Image (cartoon, rainbow, N blue to C red):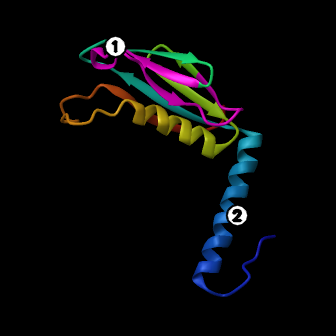
């Protein structure tokens, strides 16, 4: 049982944050978390490859050097299945940060994002592996 030390809103907010973190940890141990990303390419066919604890996105808009992103956490697993990238693991923070790193690595600066839609985008967040 977790109870706040004081009666202020801030104390209650911190207590509820701790409760949700513990709840997410228990859910992660029991079921795990899965984030799904979709590979979208219209201009150049890109490929996603795993190299150790990094994810490489090659041929993004015809770029010669690959864009890399870090896999966070030791238990986080990344797999590429066709046009989907699955990020799975027991820690919600590690899984979501890894998916965000992959999505941000394909962000195009200086271009209209409504026209240049190429990239990797999160489309599903699930409990369970």
Residue ID at (41%, 18%): 66
Q: Which residue is at the front of the view, 31 or 75?
A: 75
* 47 over 33 or under it: above or below: above
Query: Which type of secondary structure does the marked residue at label 2 adopt?
Result: helix
Q: Can residue 120 be seen in the rendering of this structure?
A: yes
Q: Please state the horizontal and vertical placement of residue 29, each as a whole percent of the image.
A: 76, 41
Alpha carbon of mark 2 to alpha carbon of mark 1: how far?
Answer: 47 Å
State yes or no: residue 18 in magenta.
no
For label 1, count other residues whose C-alpha is less than 10 Å away and answer few (under 14), some (14-19) or many (20+): few
Q: Can residue 124 be seen in the rendering of this structure?
A: no
Quadrant where the image shows the C terminus: top right
Residue ID at (69%, 38%): 32
Residue ID at (68%, 57%): 21
The residue identified by callout 2 is 19
Q: Give the numbered dot on residue 73.
A: none
The residue identified by callout 1 is 64
Q: Please state the horizontal and vertical placement of residue 118, each as a whole percent of the image.
A: 30, 25
Q: Please state the horizontal and vertical placement of residue 77, each as a whole percent of the image.
A: 64, 27
Range of magenta residues = 54-78
């Amino acid at each position: 049982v977790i109870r706040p030390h004081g009666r202020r809103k801030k104390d209650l907010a911190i207590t509820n944050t701790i409760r949700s973190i513990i709840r997410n940890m228990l859910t992660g141990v029991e079921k795990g978390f899965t984030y799904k990303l979709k590979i979208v390419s219209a201009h150049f066919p890109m490929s996603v490859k795993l190299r150790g604890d990094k994810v490489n996105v090659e041929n993004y808009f015809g770029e010669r050097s690959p864009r890399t992103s870090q896999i966070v956490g030791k238990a986080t697993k990344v797999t590429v299945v066709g046009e989907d990238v699955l990020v799975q693991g027991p820690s919600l923070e590690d899984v979501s940060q890894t998916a965000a790193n992959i999505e941000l690595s394909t962000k195009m600066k200086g271009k209209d994002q409504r026209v240049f839609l190429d990239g990797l985008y999160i489309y599903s967040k699930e409990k369970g592996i």
